[in-house]
Image: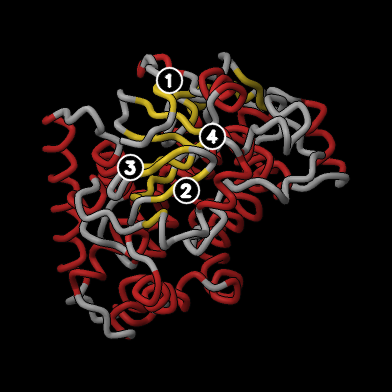
Amino acid sequence: MSSADVHDIDLKAFKNDPYPILKYFRKNSPIAYVPQLNATLFSKHQDIFICEKNVEIFSSVQPDGLMTKLMGQNMMRKDGDAHITERKAIFPTVSPKTVKNFWKNQFVEKTNKIINNIGNKRELELVSEFSTQVSAEALKLITGLSGMTWMEMDRVSQGMIDGCSNYIGDPAVAKNCDDCTRSIDLHIDAQLKHPNLHDSPSLLSSQLDAGLSMETIKANIKLAISGGQNEPRDAIAGTIGTLLNNDSQLKMIKSGSKSWLQAFEEYARWMSPIGMSPRRIAKDFNYKEVHFYKNDMIFFMFGSANRDEEIFQNPDHFDISRDNRSSISFGAGPHFCAGAWISKTLIAEVALPLFFSNFSNVQLKKTLEFEGWAFRGPKKVILENWDK
């Protein structure tokens, strides 16, 4: 373990609301070792922004990490040329041009179908009945796993997320994660036989065209599913619920003075759907009088950096008018989220405007509650539709 100050935390309280604990860390111990997580946490924006780029020390390669063991060594767990090669391989899938010219219209089509199925409901649970389906249907397109149902896409994503966050070693969680990864492998194998496999620039077809091994292809698709389902799912529902809770800001968007993108980017800063990114110390190293030893586990706490008082004024307040250029919701270094453009398009150009244009008279029925620290989102978002 590193020589950082040791701080114990209550994991249940941390999962329920990590922000008071992270605020304490930023003020009193910006680099702190937490025994309950067996990791050293970086909580300040500047430290994370600097150290995340230093891949020779803060390595993404984690052969003994939960993600690698459970999902295979995907490109998020590689550095240098190996990482660059795989990012190039998936670029035909995630490039801004592809998103605009190929995926966006399909996102619109899928989202409108979902809205048509729920439009007559007086009460709506937004996570299960809207955002989960929107995210999953988009991810089916992006991955190329068209034979998977949206329910199964959400199940296997959550199972892998739970597995990769299983730092206490719960055997039931690990068993379920194994079942989820097997399901993905079976769907990939079935899709390889599909005659229209190469009709779209999916992650499966793009990686096959680039000549990547099946082991690598499967690991990268699992990576896309693990993060590509929960982040849009939680951000769509969370942003809608938060805007309904801040009517004056919603009115600014509807009047045209602010945008849906500003709302999404502020939500991603304020609630950080992806709150943490792990790294492994590649060799002994000193930083700010803390000594790190080879193979120490490091957690870059993005959720904390996005509420750093030295970067953002009144950071605990949701404000779509603020300048969010300093936020690191999608990372800051070479591992900046490859799917960022897809996420922004799906959420800010499709899901949010289509929802509010079809549900013009909805309101929250229950107070919003959030949970999670590595991945954070709303438990439920229950709405009343007064047009019905």
Q: Residue at x 77, y 48 (%)?
A: 259
How crowded pointer 2 is (Cα within 10 Å; few <14, some 14-19, many 20+) is rated as many
Q: What colour scheme has been applied to the protein in the rendered image?
A: secondary structure
Give the residue type at disc 4: Ser
Q: Is residue 82 left or right of residue 375?
A: left
Tag count? 4
Q: Residue at x 30, y 23 (%)?
A: 36
How crowded pointer 4 is (Cα within 10 Å; few <14, some 14-19, many 20+) is rated as many
Q: Is residue 13 above or below residue 371?
A: above
Q: Where does label 2 land, which residue?
A: 134
Give the residue type at disc 1: Phe
Q: Earlier in the sequence, mark 3 or mark 1?
A: 1
Q: Locate residue 322: give its quadrant.
A: top right
How crowded pointer 1 is (Cα within 10 Å; few <14, some 14-19, many 20+) is rated as some
| Alpha-carbon span between mark 4 and mark 1 | 14 Å
Q: Where does label 4 land, which residue?
A: 43
Q: Where does label 3 land, which residue?
A: 297
- In the image, 325 versus 111, the foreground residue is 325
Quadrant showing the N terminus: top left
Which structural element holds mark 4?
Answer: loop
Which structural element holds mark 3?
Answer: strand
Q: Is residue 194 above or below residue 35?
A: below
